[in-house]
């Protein structure tokens, strides 16, 4: 709406459909052993490595997916997204911590606020 005597400014659409440089998310962290660790979004390359490892495992085991491959995928996801937590430390975590950390990473990198809030309700676990 314009007032009398003024002109309305019309925005000319840009030829850029999506500016990936503008896709910025807030840094999110987890705390482990008293230190803050930045959660990094997984790269396409890291995702492909996970898929390739899963495919190889399934091929070698007759197409049967089990808890072993799920745990390996969780460890790979965690070490890829939080490289400041060594893989050996991840393997020593309780299963509960491993599962919660995986949920938090998936939520943080996918911007699912409900899951992040659910995962925060852990009382330091």
Image: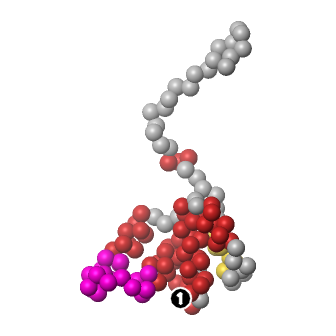
Q: Is residue 88 magenta?
A: no
Asked where in the image residue 57 lies, by quadrant, the reply is bottom left
x and y, in percent, of residue 27 in the image:
64, 62
Which span is picked out in magenta?
A: 53-70
Q: Quadrant of the C terminus?
A: bottom right
Magenta span: predominant SS is helix
Asked where in the image residue 35 lies, by quadrant, the reply is bottom right
- The residue tagged with tag 1: helix, strand or loop? helix
x and y, in percent, of residue 19 in the image:
50, 44
User: Which residue, as the protein is rendered here, is positioned at the far bottom?
Assistant: 92
In the figure, 41 relative to 25: above or below? below
x and y, in percent, of residue 28 in the image:
64, 65
Residue drawn at 45 percent across, 39 percent down: 17
Residue drawn at 28 percent across, 81 percent down: 63
Q: Can residue 23 be seen?
A: yes
Label 1: how many Cα within 10 Å (few below 14, some 14–19, many 20+): few
Q: Which residue is mark 1?
A: 91
All told, the count of numbered labels is 1
Asked where in the image residue 39 lies, by quadrant, the reply is bottom right
Residue drawn at 43 percent across, 86 percent down: 67
Q: Is residue 68 magenta?
A: yes
User: Which residue, as the protein is rendered here, is positioned at the far top?
Assistant: 5
């Amino acid at each position: 709406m314009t007032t009398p005597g003024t002109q309305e400014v019309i925005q000319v659409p840009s030829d850029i459909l999506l500016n990936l440089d503008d896709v910025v998310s807030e840094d999110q962290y987890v705390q482990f052993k008293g230190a803050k660790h930045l959660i990094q979004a997984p790269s396409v390359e890291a995702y492909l490595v996970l898929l390739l490892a899963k495919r190889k495992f399934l091929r070698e085991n007759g197409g049967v997916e089990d808890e072993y491959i799920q745990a390996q995928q969780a460890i790979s996801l965690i070490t890829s997204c939080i490289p400041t937590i060594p893989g050996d430390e991840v393997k020593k975590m309780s299963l509960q911590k491993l599962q919660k950390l995986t949920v938090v990473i998936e939520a943080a990198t996918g911007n699912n606020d409900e899951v992040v809030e659910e995962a925060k309700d852990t009382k330091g676990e």
